[in-house]
Amino acid sequence: MGLLSDPNRRRALTKLLTRLNAPICVMCYLAGVAWFMGLAFEPFTLRTYMSENAMGSTMVEERFPAGERALATGREFAAHKKKVGGMPVDWLVKTMQSRGLEVFTQSFTRKLPFPDENKERYMVRGTNVYGILRAPRAPRTEALVLSAPCSEGNNNNQAVGLLLGLAQYFRSQIHWAKDIIFLVNEHDLIGMQAWLEGYHHTNTTGGDWSPLQGRGGSIQAALSLELSSDVITSLDLVLEGLNGQLPNLDLANLFYAFCQKIGVLCTIQGKLQRNDWDTTSGYSHAAQTMMLMVLKQASGRPWGDHGLFLRYHIEAASIRGINSFRQYKTDTTTIGRLLEGMYRKLNNLLERLHQSYFFYLMPSLSRFVSIGYYMPAFGLLAVILLLRALDLWVQLGASPPGTEDGVAGGEQVSHGVVNKVCVCVYLWYVMCNYSIYLFISLEVNNLLVYVSIIDSFLLSPSVLHQPSSPGVLSILTPVVISHMTGVALYTLPILSQEMAVQHFPVSETEAVVLTAIAIYTAGLALPHNTHRLLQGEGTEEGWRVLKLVALLYLAVLLGCTALINFSLGFILALSLVPIAAFITPHTPKALSAAIMVLLSPGCTLLYCVFLFQELQETPVSLQDGWMLFLSVISQGILDHALYGSLVYPLLALLIYPCWLLLWNILFWK
């Protein structure tokens, strides 16, 4: 405290901070990137372990003798599915009833905001079929779920056959203390969303579905099974859910423990585990696995039917059969034993999974990185924004050189400048609060929120004490215009699709994507000097105040995003922090503009598409990559409309307007 209370020491610290600000920021950025890349080095990670005592090792032998019969049931299911051209509802109902289950159906209808050209659907109608095995030794207040999506063509028929085989085998056991629900959902995620909303009596996405006639207890955990071949060489564990949510780590530990016990080859992100971590190739393999998880989590989309369970605080994962490693073979009987063992362990739970981690990264199934290890990488990037903001605060608070009472060339505080800075910081505070409100409640179409922002700003005490505030208006103008552009980017692509189809030879999906790209590009063509619309001129002090607001605003946005979805926050910080820290109106315009465009949110998304394909060892050409990029945009908008993914509104309403503020600073006059 003595360092801060002594004026001479405080002045020396301020000078040191101002003089070394840029080198410290560069060092923090490099250290943050190095820290993140070091997380894949095995000695820096933790070994997975089972935290829940109820799922510890026991002397029970896993059994499932009906593997071949399950495959025969799967082939029978495929024949009936081909015969009716979709979900064989009647056959499923009869088959589940013959296995002693209480069987119910649920019909649902969902109209997409625009056609999904990947699966060629616009109006989706389907039926979910589920059977409940009542717990014989408990009051039936808790439940477990095993699901298998009814996919198009020949996909996932074996999973439905195994599900029905497990239902018949479980029916002969008497040790179940929880209801077990066997669910076959149609249209993948859309059907799963309808079933979950019906089960929990909610309707957050505007779907139309019939109420469920039968329910089990409170769902504790769920597994989604995906098998599309009679011969399985390995099982891949899929964890990433909606908005980057992950299940409790004990669920992944349970899967890995049974794979080790039974001798099943298991993978994560489709990659095998390696033990040569001390070699360059071993480290590269672990880094690729971890970065694949980061990219999947940052997308915010559910990568399996399990991803929608996580919204309801249900620990869930997808188990996907892979037929690629030819030297290994796993029959259906072995997979059935693994699932029987996992459900027997989950049946022992006395409470929800909670003792292990919910925030983690996994470079392999046997190692993980906890939140305490990876958050410093983001913190080193975020501190750059605070350092630059502090530097601007010092510059704005210092009097011009040559004042009568100046110390060492002007150290005395200028009250007029400080008042304006306080006003702008108050504006930043109000904007952040309303932005977080918009981000959580998604009431983004209500433009009155922006009016209330202006009202709150104009009624602030700092403004009322100033006789005139043209400088404040020059800061407020680019803030409002940038956010109005973000609102247009969020709302207009879907609202204007019919008009675009009428005037241009494009489909509805192409119209939505091209409109979004057009609005995004048009934001660059806004008046570069929006701060001069009301005042007519800009000042040197004005762009500093605007940058201070933008830095603090971006720091809050990235901080909140990283707490919810670390991967998304870290990727955005990698691209936005450098331009936010060093952009000024005095840098070369052409070079700085090119760098800003290359590091914009849209280009960052394009880079992630190519990087994801490279990490999956399926590189694409520039043309194919561009088509994938367009598909990712349309899928992101659909995921937001169908399942409530927050990535698209976050980028459109908050991140892109913040980037536009930095764009205005570059062209400040």
Image (cartoon, rainbow, N blue to C red):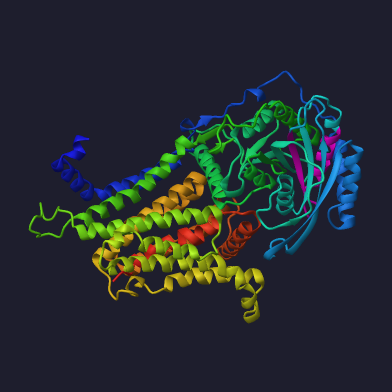
Residue farthest along the bottom direction in this orientation: 503
State the image coordinates of residue 565 (x, y, percent, origin top left). Answer: 52, 46
Residue furthest to the left in view is 404
Instruction: Point out residue 394 in the picture as x, y percentages from the top left corner.
Output: 23, 52
Q: Quadrant of the N terminus?
A: top left
118 lies left or right of 133: left
User: Looking at this view, is 419 or 428 the one in front?
Assistant: 419
**163 part of magenta stretch:** yes
Q: Which residues are magenta?
A: 142-168
Rendering coords of residue 532 (x, y %): 32, 73
* Residue 624 vertical position relative to residue 152 in the rendered view, above or below: below
Kindly identify the residue that appears in the image at 15 percent across and 43 percent down.
7
Instruction: Quarter of the image for the C terminus: give it.
Output: bottom left
Figure quadrant of residue 99 = top right
Quadrant hosting residue 418:
bottom left
Relative horizontal placement of residue 455, taking residue 16 as reference (left or right): right
The answer to whether any part of residue 223 appears in the image is yes
From the viewer's perspective, is 467 left or right of 665? left
Does the image show residue 117? no
Residue at figure coordinates x 44%, y 62% from the top left = 452
